[in-house]
Amino acid sequence: MKTLLLKAERENIKLAAEIIRKGGLVAFPTETVYGLGADATNGEAVAKIFLAKGRPYFDPIIVHIGSEEMLPLVVKEISDIARKLSSVFWPGPLTLILPKTEKIPNIVSAGLPTVAVRMPKNEIALNLINEAGVPIAAPSANSFGRPSPTSPQHVLEDLDGKIDLILDGGETQIGVESTVLDLTVPIPTILRPGGISKEALEEVLGEVSLSGAEGVIKSPGQLKKHYSPKAQVILFSGEGEGVIEAIKEKIRELKPKGKVGLLLPEEKILYFKDEDVLLWDLGSYKALDVVAKRLFYSLRSLDREGVDFIIAIAPPKEGIGLAIYDRLFKAAGSQKIDVVAK
Ligand code: TXA
Ligand code: MG
């Protein structure tokens, strides 16, 4: 199959919508990452997403809507909490887990009685969905397990020849995926931290739980290793001198085994400038929005540089920092090295 890469102009969005209606696959930008879309009401079309990505069928897919009117097509009972959250955060990077309708085939929800739904905050995405006239099922447009794509080039890297079209809308704004919030349990529970912070949800909801903290996998997407570059990621957490020393020791241990890359906040780079390693500046941990935007691109870039090991430091878990932390932790195979201050 030849994959078209076209600027996200009006005519091309129309073409993309036609491809979706005919059961094809289109990658498109959202405010978080690029999605790989198919008609969410067409099980055969959605099956092609799993094939193109190499995604296991037990991992359900998010359904994207272009207007409030599409919601009843996807969701059976729209609770008051769901209404409240959608009015505050949509369009935007919040995905809600709610009971699904018969219109949404089982392949979308991996057999679950629930469905993940969100309205993206991106004009191209919204135009595409509304032009197609159907909700669009779309996971991130990467090969399964790889870092999510934040540019059309990343999509091409992973999916060239496997999908019909990529709509080029430049780089995505947020850089990490949406927050997935389960509303089918007594206390709303974050299954995946993302673009809407836990703090922002708490302001609206009061109590919000965070799943996965105890290592229990509640969402099929909470696999222990995910978002991984080819290199092995080693995550450190801790403050001050101790963590610098521990990383230097790790570098000495790893150097004989392969090429080492450091993926560090600006504040820490300077401590390693004399080391014979590849230094990659993630931006300041005081500006976590910028770090989020650069994260997946940085992981992919380090891969391209051919490093065998990537050493990173955990960011503060505040605001979007929680999502960044989650992605780094998963990339590291759900392990980290805690350095206790002396
Ligand atoms: O920002 C995003 O969310 C992007 C853009 C394209 O919208 N999409 C995205 O999709 O990240 P994906 O498939 O890579 O991640 C969807 C997550 C997975 O962790 C999946 O397990 C979870 O949502 N999920 C989907 N449906 C679910 C359901 N019914 N119950 C629990 N978790 C669900
Ligand atoms: Mg994904």
Image (cartoon, helix red, strand yellow):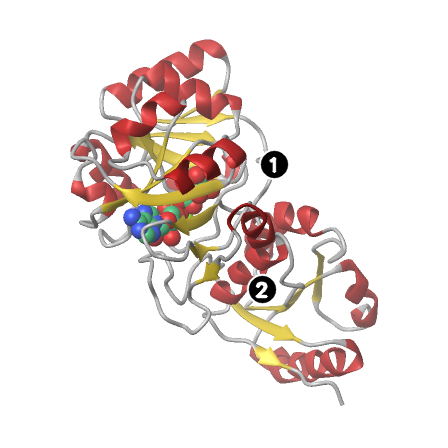
> Which of 278 and 233 lies nearest the eye of the viewer?
233
Q: Quadrant of the N terminus?
A: top left
Q: CA distance from mark 1 to mark 2?
A: 27 Å
**Mark 1 sits on what residue?**
173
Q: Amino acid at mark 2?
A: Val
Circle 1 SS class? loop
Q: Which quadrant of the structure image shows residue 131?
A: top left
- Residue 289 lies, with reference to residue 243, above or below; the image says above
The spot of residue 129 in percent (x, y) is 38, 22
- Residue 92 lies, with reference to residue 127, above or below; the image says below
> Which of 122 and 281 lies nearest the eye of the viewer?
122
Q: Amino acid at mark 1?
A: Gln
Mark number, residue 307: 2
Which of the two discs, 1 and 2, sits closer to the camera? 1
With 335 as the anchor, is 237 left or right in this view?
Answer: right
Query: Could one spot residue 229 in this view of the protein?
Result: yes
